[in-house]
Amino acid sequence: MSTTVLVVEDAPESLELICSFLKQNGMTTFAARSLAEMRQRLQSHQPDIILLDVNLPDGDGIEAARKLRLGSLYGLIFVTARDSDDDILAGLDAGGDDYVTKPINLKTLHARIRSVLRRSREPVITFDGWILDVVRRELFRPNGQLLELTAGEMNILVALASRPGEPLSRDFLLDVIANRDPTSISGHTVDNLIARLRKKMQLDGKDAPILTVRGIGYALMVGRA
């Protein structure tokens, strides 16, 4: 079954380039040049993924995604020239599964679309009593209570939980959440998300099972006493 992608982009050249490339790779695409057009398309189409520009003629894509809860209804990848750590965190917190910066590498964009689709099909992951439902994007405490996570926190946790006990570098984890220009965006984005995860996952004074691996990055430690 073909993947359906809604491309929301106001620059005609970029819109045509992305749509043509995705069609050549077997995907079905439809386009919108503004937030108003996006809302119209969504009334008659059900995309698997939305590629959403941030700077649009009738508003901010991140703010629109937050208000419309796009990330809870569709796969969502922001595609934008805005590439600061704050912008990336804002996009992920608004429900984005990924954040790709311009100029776009089309092969990388295609890989990221496939990555979002794979994550949506992964099974439930359990560790130390925690239950991570990747399909529904929900994390449950050992007592069964739902723990609310932002999209960025969820993506980082899924990456760690998919490879338990294995140290993952900051660069790898940053690649999980965003395609970035290494000259302008740093691993502090990952550090901020890890700090927030640890704070949320503390239980009765017990630290979250996320270990800092000196000189490498982070690992999810399971089966600890």
Image: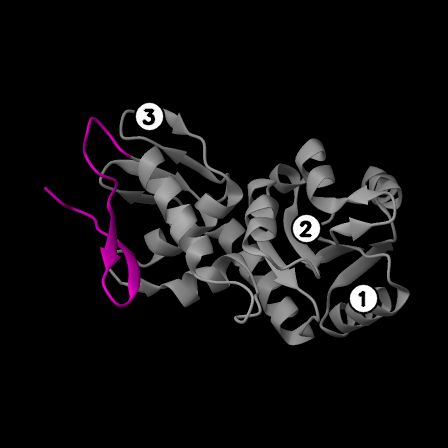
Which residue lies under the disc numbered 1?
Answer: 19
Residue 33, numbered label: none
Regarding residue 12, the answer to whether it shows in the image is yes
Asked whether 123 or 20 is in front, the reply is 20
Q: Is residue 98 left or right of residue 131?
A: right
Based on the displayed image, in which of its 4 quarters is residue 138 positioned? top left
Helix, strand or loop at disc 3? loop
Q: Residue furthest left?
A: 225
Helix, strand or loop at disc 1? helix
Helix, strand or loop at disc 2? loop
Callout 2 crowding tier (Cα within 10 Å): few <14, some 14–19, many ≥20: some
Q: Is residue 50 magenta?
A: no
Q: Give the magenta-colored segment's residue range.
A: 202-225
Q: Earlier in the sequence, mark 1 or mark 2?
A: 1
Which residue is pictured at 33% across the width and 25% down the height? 144
- In whole angstroms, how far apart are the C-alphas of marks 1 and 3? 43 Å
Where 37 falls versus 213 (above or below)? above
Which residue lies under the disc numbered 3?
Answer: 144
Callout 3 crowding tier (Cα within 10 Å): few <14, some 14–19, many ≥20: few
Where 209 falls versus 217 (above or below)? above
- In whole angstroms, how far apart are the C-alphas of marks 2 and 3? 30 Å
Q: Are marks 2 and 3 in contact (CB under 8 Å)?
A: no
Residue 218 lies, in percent from the top left, at 30, 57
Q: Which amino acid type is shown beneath numbered disc 1?
A: Cys
Q: Earlier in the sequence, mark 1 or mark 3?
A: 1
Which residue is pictured at 42% across the width and 66% down the height? 172
The quarter of the picture where the C terminus appears is top left
Which residue lies under the disc numbered 2?
Answer: 48
Q: Which amino acid type is shown beneath numbered disc 3?
A: Gly
Residue 182 lies, in percent from the top left, at 52, 70
Q: Which amino acid type is shown beneath numbered disc 2?
A: Asp
Q: Are marks 1 and 2 in contact (CB under 8 Å)?
A: no
